Image: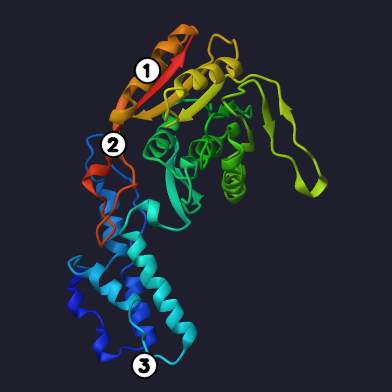
Amino acid sequence: MTQLDVLDLPQLHTKPSAQSLLDTLALLTSAPPSWEFDNNGDQDKHTDSARAQSNVVLVNPEGVTRYLTSIVSNSLRWIEDDEAKEEIWNQASTRLSERSGRSAMGSLSRKFRIPSSTSSFELSIHEPALTGDDIGLKTWAASYMLAKRLHTFGIVQPGTSRRPQVLELGSGTGLVGLAMAALGADVVLTDLPSIHANLSRNAEDNAGTVRHNGGVTRTGVLDWANPTICKLAGDAASSDQGETITTKFPLILAADALYSPDHPRMLVESIDAWLSSDSNARVIIEFPYRQAYLPEIKDFRQRMEGIGLHVLDEGEEKGYDDWSGSDANGHQDETALVTCWWSCWGR
């Protein structure tokens, strides 16, 4: 593996060609993190190997931000093609935003590899630019951790054509629900109206993978403030307003869904409204231990017990959120490491 210094890159005083600058800016791309970590928080060796193969040339991060800033602020007068100049400035600006944390980045799509009991599959998840307070437009570490853990619960039985009926609450970008569907389940993914458009897009983008693996997805709106109403998305082409769901579910999923003191009550009320009365009904959740929301997790546990549900199995694992910044080679800031608590609940 080769590592370059920033002084090895084309210097503006030499008036490099437009293509040379574009090639360099492509080299400086910071890819979204893979979040592939083992339960001790150590980088997975397979991921290290894949990263090493895909980044044959690395650049020492020292001075890269200053280099990118110099490109953005330069007139590039020696380049006559105005479109090429615009593209260079845009790419340099994008490289800068990639080094400023997820909140500064534009929209992106990233792929997540999810294990099954026999092999694995890949899901493509789109995240719009984070221009407001809709944290459901971003994929969080707890969602990825839970998506990778789902196959261990034995929810989909091999050799049967019957699909488990699953409801996901607070689906966000849909990674968990789509993973469950791609394991062979019939999943209804739900969130607020402001989140639903991107959720629906991700369901459509991954429909082929889900269908190939024997699963089904539907998306809809379920507002925890009014937890008894779940309305599926309609068909715009036919002016269909969408079906209102009335049947309860033997399995409910939720990940990283507690962000206010009201959320434990609202989430548990939604679970109580939609979990079937079957003795083998289950709720599977995963939440990160963020210091500010530890009281919400405690409240959630108490309220779940209050509706007659108890922990059947639980554990902890480590993952990365990418809200903070990364270095010039896309490695996460250590402060982004989070410990997540997963649990399976039953009656």
Q: Nearer the viewer, residue 268 or 204?
A: 268
Residue under the point 59% across and 10% down = 277
Q: Regarding mark 2 in the picture, which secondary structure is present there?
A: strand
The label shown at residue 136 is none
Residue 202 at what x, y percent from top left? 57, 47
Give the amino acid type for the residue marked by disc 1 in the picture.
Answer: Asp
Answer yes or no: is residue 289 visible.
no
Percent of width and height locating residue 222: 61, 29
Instruction: Mark 2: give few (<14), some (14-19) or many (20+) Cα within 10 Å.
Output: some
- What residue sits right under mark 3 in the picture? 78
Read off the residue under disc 2.
Answer: 338
Camera-side residue: 39 or 303?
Answer: 303
Label 2 close to label 3 by CB (< 8 Å): no
- Locate residue 93, reporting x and y percent: 38, 69
Residue type (three-letter) at the residue carrying disc 2: Val
Tell me the mark number nearer the camera, choosing from 1 and 2: 2
Instruction: State the residue position of label 1.
Output: 313
Q: Which mark is nearer the camera, 2 or 3?
A: 3
